Amino acid sequence: MIHVYTLQDGRLTRAAEALHDAVPDQDIVWIDALDLDGDEERWLQRRFRIDVEAPDDDADIEASARVFVDAQGNLNLRADFLIGRGHEYVTEALRFVIGPHMLISLHDDELPIMRLLRMRNRAQPGKLAQPTDILIELFALDVEQSADALEHIYTELESVSARVLGEQRGSDDAAADSITRIARNEDLNGTIRRNLMDTRRALSWLMREHRLGKAQTDKVKQILRDIESLDGHTAFIFDKINFLMDAIIGFINLNQSKVVKIFSVASVAMLPPTLIASVYGMNFAHMPELGWRWGYPFSLGLMALSVALPFWYFRRKGWLK
């Protein structure tokens, strides 16, 4: 699917598909190519003389070759963007072809930030005057989405923290569920950190290519400062994740220690009756108790008393809690 956009009174206007060939090149400011089929790829290659490469293939090239200038003098840039799917986030590889008067974006999945960019442009026209303005705004929205995702992670970790350190901390089921949630958020935090690193690298390349005006350079610097602050926040979240993991492992060890303590107390309490039973199980000829009428009940009572006294003593000391 190909969307062709022109600028009219500062607003992005999408041309109808049937009119794509009728729109002059100098009027086109942005071409958004989504999940192209063979005919669409050939149309792009024929009209704009660009090498249409699938983003998945483009993602396998070396990092040093993610930005290059093609034979027509267009700047080619590959970058990752964050996509939110419910409470999950994934990254989508996009390829941009940046010409003097036109931006071409190629990707396989729909990005919500592109729809958000068009909505903001309708509400505040005039901010997008050049193709690079569109690209920079997409990066800015991607950073905003990363910030929202980090806020979601922190809220999730606060919920886990309340559960881990609250009344349910002794529950093994709660510990298993908390570990699952922490692991999911740790993976998400790593995804966001990697995406921010990729965005920082792409913006740094744009500045080094000297294709930005002063206002655009100032905005890119602001985005880089935002990325720096978010990068520090991801490090804080990693520390919080490690703390919660250590706390959960500590509570699991405490639960295991309680079980071991119960077995230890039970084994110690059972030693006296075992000793009594062993004594009266001896086969000596002169054992006065063997002739007693109440010898058997006496031995049973003595064994019961020898069990009760240690448990009473352990309970008084608080060793059974």
Image (spheres, rainbow, N blue to C red):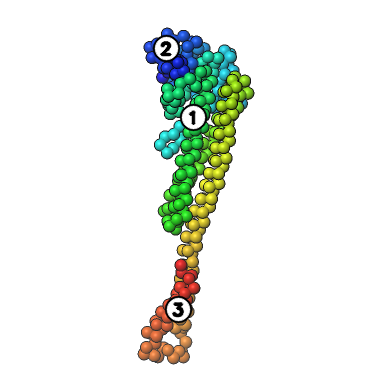
Element under label 2? helix
Identify the amino acid type marked 1.
Leu
Element under label 3? helix
Q: Are marks 3 and 2 in contact (CB under 8 Å)?
A: no
Q: CA distance from mark 3 to mark 2?
A: 94 Å
Q: CA distance from mark 1 to mark 3?
A: 71 Å
What residue does disc 1 label?
141
How many neighbours does mark 3 have within 10 angstroms: few (below 14), some (14-19), or many (20 or more)? few
How many neighbours does mark 1 have within 10 angstroms: few (below 14), some (14-19), or many (20 or more)? some
**Residue 269, how many percent across, how many down?**
46, 74
Instruction: Mark 1 or mark 3: name the one nearer the start of the chain.
Output: 1
Instruction: Mark 3 or mark 2: name the one nearer the start of the chain.
Output: 2
Quadrant of residue 66 in the image? top right
For residue 281, above or below residue 153: below
Q: Residue at x 53, y 25 (%)?
A: 136
Identify the amino acid type marked 2.
His
What residue does disc 3 label?
309
What residue does disc 2 label?
20
Instruction: Mark 2 or mark 1: name the one nearer the start of the chain.
Output: 2
Q: Are marks 1 and 3 in contact (CB under 8 Å)?
A: no
